[in-house]
Structures are given as C-alpha cells and as structure tokens.
Amino acid sequence: MRPICAGSSGHRLSMGDSAMATVTFQPKSPNQLDSDALMPAPPLPGQEPFVPEPVEEIEDTGLPESLVNSLVFKYLLQVGEATGRGIAGALCLPSRPVIELLSNMKNQRLVVYKDTGSMGDFIYVMTEEGRDVAKRYMRENSYVGPAPVPLDYYVRSVKAQTIEAEKPRIDQLRDAFGDLLINEAMFQRLGPAICSARGMLLFGEPGNGKSSIAERITKCFGSTIIIPKAIYIDGVIINFYDAGTHVLVEDPAEEAHDTDTDTRWVRIKRPTIVVGGELTMDALELRFNPLTKITEPSLQLKSNCGTLVIDDFGRQRVNPDELLNRWIVPLEKRQDFLTLHTGKKINVPFDQLIIFSTNLEPKDLVDEAFLRRIPYKINVTDPSEEEFRELLRMMSEQVAVEYDEHAIDYLIERWYQATGRPFRCCHPRDLLLQILNRSLYLGTKARMTEDLFDAACDCYFAML
C-alpha cells in the first residue's frame, strides 16, 4: 500500500519509511487510532511540504474494492457513456486498473463497447443489467465524484501540516495586516497569540476592527495545505472539499492520470472560516443528508490547519454556555469526537487557531474554566487621535476623497471633542463613504469640507 507521504531532503518517502516517524502509516481502524496519532507533531528540520504519492493500483487507495466498483458504476450511469481513461480521470483513480475493471464488467455483460477511443481505449455504455446494478449502488448513497481518502490518511495529513508547526514572525504579521492600521502595542499582543495557534479572544467596543483582525490572521501563516476532496470511514462518505470555504491554488480540472500526485487531494490556502450570529450547534457536527446519503463535515473539521472565527460571539441563536462547553475538551486535547449517522463516534484532529470576537463583556459570557483554555485575551481598544487622523488619510486614498487637514480639525473638534464621542476605527471609512456618495449624487468633486462632514455626521451619528 502506498498512501500519503511527507518527504524530507527533497524526496518522497512511503509510509513504511522509519525515518518519517511523525507520519508513518500502519493501517488501523479509525476507532483504533490512539490519541498520539491525532496530536500535531513538531516539524522536522528541513521538512518538505506534504505531498500525497500517486496511486498505481486500487489497493493503493486504501479503499475497499467494492467502493471503487460502485463509483465506476454510478459515474457511468450518470454520464451515459465515457472512455476508460475519462472515467479514471473523473474519479481521480489510476487508469490501468479502472480499464481492467471495465474489461471485467464487459465480460459480465454489465457494459459494452460503443466505439473505440484513443490509445487503445474504448467508449463504454451500460447494459440494462449494468444499470440495475448502478441503481442499487445509488440507493446506498448518491455520491459521484473523486474517490475519497480513508479517514486515517486524512488524520495523518493534518498531523504533517499542523498549524502549530507554523511560527509567523513580525514581518509576516506586518504583511498580513498591511491594509489595516495596527499599532506596535497591538502587534506585540497579537504576535505571540498567533504563534501559539491556540485559542484567542478579541473583545472591545464595536467598530474597532476585531472582525478585520480575525479575518487576516490566517494570512500570517503564509502557506498552503493539501486536503482530500472526500473522506471515507466505515461505509460513510464525507464530502469534504467545499468550494465556498476552501480557496484552491491549483486548477481542479487537471486530470488525475497526468499528474505526479494523488489527485484525490487538492491544494488550498490555509482556510479561514468565519461564522457569526447564524451559527447553530448543528453546524458543529457531521450532517447526514437522508436523501443523498452523503455526509457534510462540521465547521471545525473544515477549518483544520487554519483559522475558525466565531464573530459576534454571544449573539448566536444558541446559549453561549452550550457553545463553549462543546469546545472545552477539543481546545484542551486538540482532538474532537464526531458522531456518524450510524451512531459510531470517530476521533478527529482539532487543529486550528480558534478566535472568538465579541463586543460584549467577556466575563459576562465566559466562565473561568473556559477562559483558562483561551490563553490570549486581547482588548481591541479605541484609536488615539493621531491614529484616527492617520486612518482618515489612508481611507481618503482608498475611497478617492480629496484630503484636507483643516476639515479634519473641524470634524474632530465639532463632532468628537465637543460631544465626548469616542473615536472608532470604522468611522473614517463610513464618513468618507457618505461624503463620496453625496458628491456623486450632487455631481461635485469628492473632497473633505466642513459642510460635507456636517452632513455625513448628522446622518451617521443620528442615533449614536
């Protein structure tokens, strides 16, 4: 068996190589995976990026032959006709064994040749008996697509690509936050928290950029990871890759048999998943669709090796205590327990930087036991007057509003100092957008003036 590997010294190693103890693979049932196998391993000196080896035989996939058979049957039922190499490419399987499988199916009169293809291949169509077999497979589950990766292969891929192995430095933070105004004191607080790859709580008044900070943190890690398109465990297929969440950095249409890797996997940017008030407890568990009989992953599973941001924490439709209790053990042990629709529990990595962002008072939301498991609590404070002026300068360039220092002096004196109103990081952007929109409406040049600031503030601060 030749499953995934992570090579060092410029070459790939099979899972049997004792030199790669951190990612060696001994086939086990997922229930037999010990906790050490789930814990992130420290990076090896000079370790090359994780790369799955290509598979040459069906047995190399780690999948039951019956599952591979079902994928071939269902794919051919769905498309009507295809060449052997076309089927192999669509399923991300090696061509030769798939063509051999189709030859056996022809001998059993489950498929027939419709025409010849290139390079000695054929165009296959199903017989009536073959369609009956495919429909039976469809009733088991309707998944048609790339062959999945066994769960234990995925567990070891997380171990090899753990976010804990990434230790961003100050220059990487500055690059990631280049479009935000972050003062040095905030960098000194954020840096160690990001390097820890553990829990972080961002709190403070609304409008000061907590969400913006959280959303940019993954950029500090500055690397990509490889994830499976689907995961297989005890007859259950988890449709893992999510185009709405995971950002590809390679062409997904690249044909499997033309590459030198196992293309059941795809390369993505380290994920950043942001959820807010819409978060429910159901999203933290595996979700089985009784119609398709396909399982969708939990939010934390999809965010492994990346960042999971719980925005507007405390405003979810679930009780904060219930949400926090769900994560106390995963935060402590770095592993999570999920339940398949069959009732079987599986042990999976919990390998992400989880960030809670809230405008509410943390001590009113979180008890001491949970706070202890979030080592970094960072108060995102109001900007100083100097920082506020710099934000206005930066935003004037971004939204194309002509800068005027005297108009800013008037804004600060009239609408902040005279009223005791605190500065907020979002105010410069919001006020300048109001000036821009009013100028577009009037057909005049967008620039800072006392009158335009008065009109913008009168509207913006009407109920604040």
Image (spheres, grey):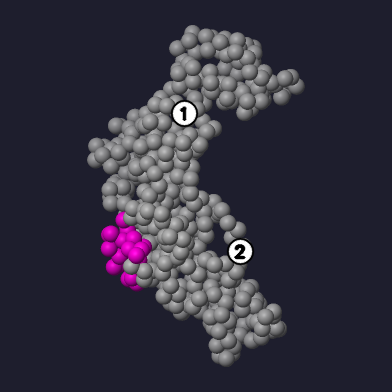
The numbered mark at residue 182 is 1
Percent across and percent down for residue 384 are: 45, 18
Between the residue at mark 1 and the residue at mark 2, the CA separation in whole angstroms equals 41 Å
Tell me the residue at 70%/83% (across/down). 116
The kind of secondary structure element at disc 1 is loop
Magenta region includes residue 271: no
Q: How crowded is mark 1: few (under 14 residues within 10 Å), some or many (20 or more)?
A: some
Q: In which quarter of the image is residue 457?
A: top right
Residue 400 located left or right of residue 261: right
Q: In which quarter of the image is residue 403?
A: top right
Residue 246 located left or right of residue 24: right
Percent across and percent down for residue 192 are: 35, 37
Percent across and percent down for residue 180 are: 51, 31
Q: What stretch is highlighted in magenta?
A: 19-39
Judging by the rendered image, the residue that carries numbered circle 2 is 254
Q: Which amino acid does label 1 sit on?
A: Ile
Q: Name, please, the residue furthest toward the left.
A: 369
The kind of secondary structure element at disc 2 is loop
Q: Can residue 311 be seen in this view?
A: no
